[in-house]
Image (cartoon, rainbow, N blue to C red):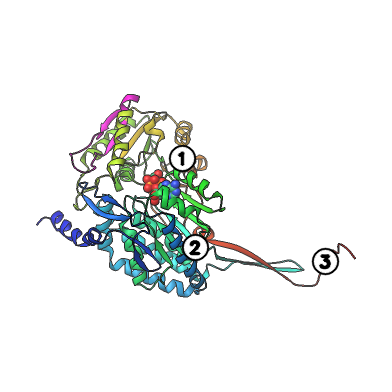
Amino acid sequence: MSALEENIARAKTYISRFAEDGVMNHIGGENVAAVSGETFEIISPVDLSKLADVAKSDAADIDRAAQAAKEAFKTWSKTPGAERRKILIKVAEAIEARAEEIAFVECMDTGQALRFMSKAALRGAANFRYFADQAPASEDGAVTRTPTQMNTTTRRPIGPVGVITPWNTPFMLSTWKIAPALAAGCTVVQKPAEFSPMTAKLLVEIAESAGLPKGVLNVVNGLGETAGKSLTEHKDIKAIAFVGESQTGSHIMRQGAATLKRVHFELGGKNPVIVFDDADIDRAVDAATFMIYSLNGERCTSSSRLLVQDTIYDDFTDRVAKVAKSIKVGHPLDPETVVGPLIHPVHEEKVLSYFETAEKEGATIAAGGEKIGKDGCYIGPTLFTNANNDMAIAQEEIFGPVLTAIPFKDEADALRIANDVEYGLAAYLWTNDLNRAMRMTDELEAGMMWVNSENIRHLPTPFGGVKSSGIGRDGGDWSFDFYMETVNVSFPRAEHKIPKLGS
Ligand code: NAD
C-alpha cells in the first residue's frame, strides 16, 4: 500500500461518521438537527463525491443557540479566569491528542494538502494555550487618581458573541477567534462556512470532552444569507467576529446596525511581495513562491502580487515560473502534494475565469493557467507576467495559486503600485538596505509587514488589515479588547463641592 492509499484508508475511518450522521448543529451540549429538518449537501473537492448532509439552519436555530449561549454566559462569565485557563489548557491538550483526525478531516473537507494541515491542529492548540494564559488577568485594568477621585478601570466580558468563519483553514481560524472569546469569559455561537463545516463540529466536541461546560460554545450550520444573517441580527448576540470577504463584511455591518453590533472584521487581501535588486534573491524566490502556492493560495495573507525591480524582473520571474512548474499538484492526502484541489467547483470557476480575463487584458501565462484533469478542482500553480497594476488579476482577490508579477523602477514606483489597491492586509518586503526598509514600511498601506521573511505569526502581535482588509486587530490583548467591555468606576477620595442647581 502506498502512503497515499494508507492515508485515504485512515481518512475514511475519520469521515465515515459524518457520512452516516451528517454534520448537525451543536447547541447547549446537544447534537441537534435544524428545527426545520432541512439539510444541504457538501462535496469533496478531491472528486466531487458527496461527503455529508449538513443542517440547514435559520433564525429559529440561531435563536435556540443564542438562548443557550445567554444561559451559559451567566456562569461562564463569573468563572474565575484561573479556572477558565485550566479548562482551556485541557482543550488544547485534547486538540493535540486528536491532531491526526483533525488534519485528515480538514484535508478531505477543504482540499488543503496534508503537509500543511498536519500543523493545523497544533496551531489551533497553540491558540488555546496562548489565550488561556491571558484569562486570569483579562479583567485587570488601571487605577488613576485625582485629589478628589480614584478611578478603577476594569474589563468584563461583553456577553454571548457570534463567530462567523470562512472555508479556508477553518479549524485554525476558528480556534483563533473562539479561544480568546472563551478566555475573556464570553460564550459563543459559531456559524461555520457552508463549504467546510466538519472541523467546527470536531472542535466543539473536543472542547466539551475536555471540560468546557455545555452551552459555552455552540455551533449552528447553514447558509450565510440565512443562518449567518440571523446571527448578526440577534439581539442577545453582543458582538460579531467575522472572517471572510470584504463585501460580506459590508453586509454584516448593515445587518448588525439595528442592534448596534460591535464588529471585528478580518477580510480580503491583495498582498504585494516587493523585491529590490539588492535582496537575497534565493531566499526571496522561496518566500514569494511559498506565500502564494502553499495552502492552495486560498489564504488571506497570500502574496498574490509580485512586484520586482525591473533590473532583475526577467531573471526573478523565470525562477518563480520554474518553481511553479515543479510543484506537485495532487490528492491532498499524498505526502508529496503541495497544491491540492480548490475548495469547490464554484470557487474553481471563479479562479479559472481570471485566466480568460488575464489573456484578454494582455498578460502572459508563464506557468500554469489551466485546469488539471477532469475530476476534482485541480488547477496548476500559475504565474502571470507582462502584467500591470490596472489588470483585474492585479486588483482583485483571486484566492487561488495565482501570482501576478509586475515590474517597478524604484522605491517611489514600488510604493505607488503596492498601495494602488483597495486592500491593505499584508506586505512583504525584500531588500538588504535597512534605510530603504524603514522608508518603505513607513509608507506601505498594510496592517502587517514582513521584511526579508515569509509570513510568520507571533500570537502577541496584532493581526489585521487596513483599508478594505478589515476592522480591528487580533492577537495579544487586542482580542480581549474586542470581546470585553471596558468599565470605569469613580470613587470619592475626599468630599468635594457638588454644584447646587436650586434651593
Ligand atoms: P465569505 O465572506 O463568502 O463567507 C464567510 C462566512 O460568512 C461564511 O460562513 C458565510 O456563510 C458567511 N456569510 C456569508 N454571507 C453572510 C451574511 N450576509 N451574513 C452573515 N454571514 C454571512 O468568505 P469565504 O469565501 O468563506 O472566505 C474567503 C474570504 O475570507 C477571502 O476574501 C479571504 O481573504 C477572507 N479571509 C480573511 C482572513 C483574514 O484574516 N483577513 C482570513 C481568512 C480568510
Disc with the residue nearer the chain's start (3 vs 1): 1
Q: Are marks 3 and 1 in contact (CB under 8 Å)?
A: no
Provide the residue designation for mark 3.
498
Q: Residue 425 lies in what quarter of the image?
A: top left
> For the C terminus, which image quadrant?
bottom right
Q: Which residues are magenta?
A: 358-384
Residue 490 relative to residue 214: left or right: right
Q: Which badge, 2 or 1, comes first in the chain's sequence?
A: 2
Q: Name the amino acid type tagged 2.
A: Pro
Residue 86 painted magenta: no
User: Residue 375 bears which disc, if any?
Assistant: none
Give percent across and percent down for residue 312.
34, 32
- Residue 423's disc is 1
User: What whole-number distance in Å separates the C-alpha atoms at marks 2 and 1?
Assistant: 30 Å
Q: Amino acid at mark 1?
A: Tyr
Relative vertical location of residue 275 with respect to residue 134 in this rendering, above or below: above
Is residue 380 shown in magenta? yes
Q: Amino acid at mark 3?
A: Ile
> Which circle marks residue 160 in the picture?
2
Judged by depth in the image, the label closer to the viewer, 3 or 2, is 2
